Image (cartoon, grey):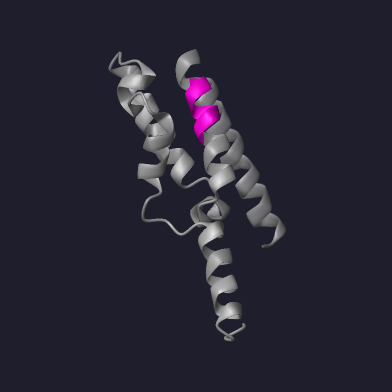
């Protein structure tokens, strides 16, 4: 990654944060909890930039614009909402478990 990519990444992140801050308060709270959850679970796509988080903001902006409460958008179980978002995504835990399995089977990297 060169300096230009880093600068663009920072600009993109700042614009993303500004979009989150423009959401209604209840949406911001749920977004931050989703963000923490996703960082903890670790879908690989998160390391490629904003990706899935931008999609969540898009969804939240649409929900807020249509007058819906945030839990009308996500459902009552926000963790299940997150799990559904990443159900087909590879996580860092998946990668770790695969490496442990390979080592156990004698097929180390």
Looking at the image, residue 29 lies above or below residue 11: above
Looking at the image, residue 2 lies above or below residue 17: below
Left/right placement of residue 8 relative to residue 31 reads right
Q: Which of the 4 quarters of the picture holds residue 11?
A: top right
Residue 88 vs residue 59, the one in the foreground: 88
Image coordinates for residue 89, horizontal then vertical, percent: 42, 56
Image coordinates for residue 68, horizontal then vertical, percent: 30, 16
Q: Which of the 4 quarters of the picture holds residue 27?
A: top left
Left/right placement of residue 77 relative to residue 39 reads left
Looking at the image, residue 60 lies above or below residue 13: above
Looking at the image, residue 45 lies above or below residue 105: above
**Which residue of the protein is positioned furthest toward the bottom in this rendering?**
106
Instruction: State the extent of the magenta-drawn residues as a range.
Output: 28-34
- Identity of the residue drawn at 52% across and 70% down: 98
Q: Is residue 67 visible?
A: yes
- Identity of the residue drawn at 67% across and 62% down: 1
Tell me if residue 87 is in the magenta stretch.
Answer: no
- Identity of the residue drawn at 61% across and 79% down: 103
**Which residue of the protein is positioned furthest toward the front in this rendering?**
104
* Number of on-image labels: 0
Residue 105 vs residue 92, the one in the foreground: 105
Tell me if residue 33 is in the magenta stretch.
Answer: yes
**Which residue of the protein is positioned furthest toward the left in this rendering?**
66
């Amino acid at each position: 990654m060169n300096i230009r990519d880093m600068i663009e990444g920072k600009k993109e992140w700042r614009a993303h944060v500004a979009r989150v801050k423009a959401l209604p308060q209840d949406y911001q709270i749920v977004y931050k909890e989703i963000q923490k959850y996703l960082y903890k679970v670790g879908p690989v796509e998160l390391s490629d930039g904003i990706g899935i988080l931008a999609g969540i903001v898009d969804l939240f902006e649409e929900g807020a614009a249509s007058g819906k409460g945030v839990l009308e958008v996500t459902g009552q179980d926000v963790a299940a909402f997150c799990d559904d978002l990443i159900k087909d995504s590879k996580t860092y835990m998946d990668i770790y478990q695969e490496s442990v399995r390979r080592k156990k089977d004698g097929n180390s990297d």
